[in-house]
């Protein structure tokens, strides 16, 4: 299984090959490939990977019994094969599925992946904001300008913009950089708002937030 294609191997209950081929890594194409096999009598297995979540839920919705196997354990089972190709891997996975000598990989829900994507997006934009701020700091040193060791990200533009505008050379080079960072920071604030909004509707997140608030509270600190 790759981002573009899937190698399919169909075997019967006795381990005999029924069909082999390659199709596009799309739910519709895989369903068409298996159209001659009744969904209730077919079990589909594949190793965990980048496309496993998409294929797992898509093929389940099409009525198939789907199993996602742990890649590390499956690779150990397939390493004994002499010729390692996509076709032989598909044959080996089919036989492992038939034998039952595998462990199922845990598949997270679509909602969990959506939250993970939101957190990853926020972290990526935050890193870019910090990188641009550090770039400005580094260029400042060349001109003998120094910023405090700690400057809040929200007030960074207010601190550095007057210093940049005071020098025409710096203005020509750094104002566009500062504008790009300001746009990224605005995007980060929006993503951060969405993360906090999602956390406010999750009971586990609310408990952790309450624990953190109690640990950082001056009253609680003095009592402890």
Image (cartoon, helix red, strand yellow):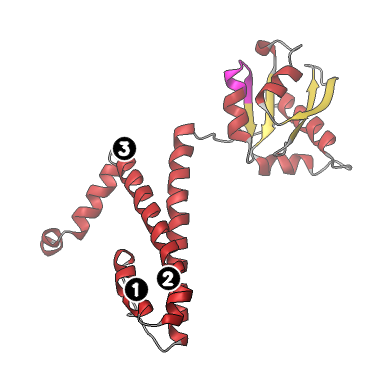
10 vs 185, nearest the viewer: 185
Residue 209 drawn in magenta: no
Q: Is residue 100 above or below residue 161?
A: above
Q: Residue 146 location in percent, x, y?
A: 37, 84
Residue 161: give its label.
1
Would residue 23 be visible to someone looking at this image? yes
Part of the protein shown in magenta: 59-66
Q: Quadrant of residue 8?
A: top right
Measure how far apart labels 3 and 1 are at the Cα level. Answer: 40 Å
Q: Is residue 186 above or below residue 69?
A: below
Q: Which residue is mark 2?
A: 175
Q: Which residue is mark 3?
A: 202
Q: Residue furthest front?
A: 168
Residue at coordinates 45% horizontally, 73% vertically from top-left?
A: 174
How many other residues sit within 10 Å of disc 2, few (<14), some (14-19) or many (≥20)? some
In the image, taking residue 126 as reference, residue 220 lies left or right, namely: left
The quarter of the picture where the N terminus appears is: top right
The quarter of the picture where the C terminus appears is: bottom left
Would residue 109 be visible to someone looking at this image? no
Q: Residue 73 location in percent, x, y?
A: 68, 41
Does the residue at mark 3 contact the one at mark 1 (Cβ under 8 Å)? no
SS at mark 3 in the image: loop
Residue 131: give its label.
none
Q: Residue furthest right?
A: 83
């Amino acid at each position: 299984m790759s981002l573009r294609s899937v190698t399919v191997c169909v075997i019967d209950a006795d381990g005999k090959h029924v069909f082999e081929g390659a199709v596009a890594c799309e739910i519709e194409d895989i369903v068409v490939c298996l159209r001659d096999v009744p969904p209730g009598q077919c079990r589909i297995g594949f190793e965990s990977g980048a496309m496993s979540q998409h294929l797992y839920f898509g093929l389940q919705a099409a009525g198939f019994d789907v199993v996602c196997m742990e890649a590390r354990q499956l690779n150990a089972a397939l390493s004994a094969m002499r010729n390692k190709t996509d076709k032989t891997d598909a044959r080996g996975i089919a036989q492992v599925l038939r034998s039952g000598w595998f462990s199922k990989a845990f598949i997270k829900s679509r909602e969990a992946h959506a939250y993970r994507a939101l957190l990853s997006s926020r972290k990526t934009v935050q890193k870019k904001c910090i990188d641009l701020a550090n770039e400005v700091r580094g260029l400042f040193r060349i001109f003998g300008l120094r910023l405090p060791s700690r400057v809040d990200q929200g007030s960074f533009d207010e601190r550095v913009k007057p210093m940049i505008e005071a020098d025409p050379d710096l203005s020509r080079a750094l104002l566009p950089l500062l504008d790009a960072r300001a746009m990224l920071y605005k995007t980060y604030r929006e993503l951060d708002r969405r993360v906090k909004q999602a956390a406010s509707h999750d009971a586990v997140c609310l408990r952790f937030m309450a624990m953190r608030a109690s640990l950082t509270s001056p009253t609680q600190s003095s009592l402890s």
